Amino acid sequence: MTRVVFRIAILLLSIFSVGLLGPPATAQPLYPTPDPDPFYAAPPNLGALQPGDVVRARRIDSGPFAGTDSWQVAFRSTNSQGNPVMGVTTVLLPPGVQNPPLVSYQALINSLGTRCSPSRSLFNGELDDAAGMMLPIRRGWAVSVPDYFGPTSAYGAARLGGMMTLDSVRAVRKVAELGLADSPVALAGYSGGGLATAWAAAMQPTYAPDLHLTAAVAGGIPADLGEMAHALGFNPHPGFGLAFAAAMGLEREYPDRLPISDQLNETGLWFRDLTHDACRRFLLHEGAFHSAEQMAASKNLMDVPEALSVLRENSLRYFEGVPTVPTFIWQGRFDQLTAFGPVAEVANRYCRAGARVQFRPYEIAEHMTTAIAGFAEAWNYIDARFRGEPAPVSC
C-alpha cells in the first residue's frame, strides 16, 4: 500500500465520517463474501480459546512454491474492539531443513475480498510480492504469511494487523508437524506490510509477552495517518480505488465509530457494492481518476473528533509501545509516497527509550526502489541475528 493511496484513503475516511455529527447511520458496512471453504469458518467456542491458540491446521498443495512443504493454520486472534476473531496464516517450509528459523512475512495486501488475502492470493496470482517468499526460503528459513487484516478484510486497520501478526506466530509455533516450536522468529514487511510488522514489534511486549522475537525489519512505514489526511485534496487520482478500499476496510473494523457508508451518495454506494470483494487490480482499474468528492453525500474535512481518534489509534507515531526486539527500520528520505519525518521520529523515540534500533535512511525518492534496496540489507540483518551476532544500533 503506497503512501499516496493510503493518504487519500484516510482523507476519504475523514470526509465521510462527518456523519458522526449528524443523523444516525442508516447504511451499514458491506463486508466481504465469506470464503466458502469450511477451513475459514470460526468454531462456536472461539471465545473460549486464548490468543494464538490453534483452531485447525492442514497441509496444502505448494502450487508455485515447488519443493516446499506448505501448510495453513487457523488460529484465535483479537480485533480492535478486543473481541475474538479467527485468523489464518500460510506456512512454507524449506526442503530438507530440520527446525529452520521462522520469518513472519507481512505481505502487501491491497484488497477487500477474502480471495485476495495471502492464504488465497499466494496461489492465485493476486499477491504482488508472492515471488519474494522464495528469498528467505532459499536461505533455509521457514516463512509464515498471515492474513493480517482478518476475516472481514479490514484493509487499513493497523492495530489489527499487529495483533494478527503476533497471534499467527504464536499459533505456528504450536503446530507440532511444522517443527517450529523452538525456532528463532523474525518479522518482516514493507509499506502496508511494514506497518503491520512495526505495530507487531511495538505491541509484542504488552500484547504477547510470552513470545520471544529475534529480529524485526520494516520499511516504507505510513506512521501518521492523520498527517496523511491533512496533506491531500480532492482531485481525481489514479489510485483512488485503493483509497476507497482502505476507507471501507476501516469502516469494517470500526462500524460503530466510522459509519462511512452512511455518508456515501448514490454513486459511492454503487462503487462500494461493486468493489466489496475486489482485489488490487480491479480496484485500481475501476477506481482510476475518480475522487472522494464524486462519492460523498457531504463534505467536511478533518473536524470530527471520533474519526481523528481512530486515525491516532492506528498511527504508530502515537503508540507508546517500544519494541524490545532488535529492529531494523528503513525509509526513503525523499520518498514521495511515505513520509520520512514521522518514521524518523518513531525511530528516535525508540532510541531514547533504549531500544536496539538501526534506522537506515536511503537517499531515494521512488517507493518501491527503496523496498528493493532495503530488503537486501534487511535480510542480512535478520541472518546476523539468527546467527547470534549483537544487533547494531544507530542511536
Image (tube, grey):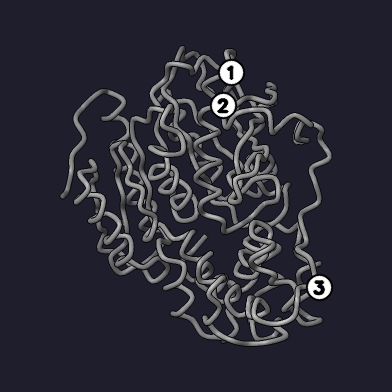
Spot occupied by residue 234 in the image (x, y as percentages of width and height): 57, 86
> Can see residue 142?
yes
Of 237 and 169, the residue lying toward us: 169
Spot occupied by residue 260 in the image (x, y as percentages of width and height): 69, 72
What's under tag 1, amino acid-wise? Val
Q: Residue at x 41, y 31 (%)?
A: 209
| Relative vertical location of residue 6 with respect to residue 133 in this rendering, above or below | below
> Residue 26 — which label?
3
Q: CA distance from mark 1 to mark 3?
A: 44 Å
- Judged from the image, the secondary structure of the residue bearing numbered disc 2 is helix
> Mark 2 or mark 3, which is nearer the start of the sequence?
3
**Of all residues shown, which one is farthest toward the left?**
395
- Tell me if 232 is positioned left or right of 384 in this view: right
Q: Quadrant of residue 76?
A: top right
Residues at marks 3 and 2 touching, judged by CB atoms closer than 8 Å: no
Residues at marks 2 and 1 touching, judged by CB atoms closer than 8 Å: yes
| Foreground tag (3 vs 2) | 3
Identify residue for label 2.
Answer: 171
Q: Quadrant of residue 377?
A: top left
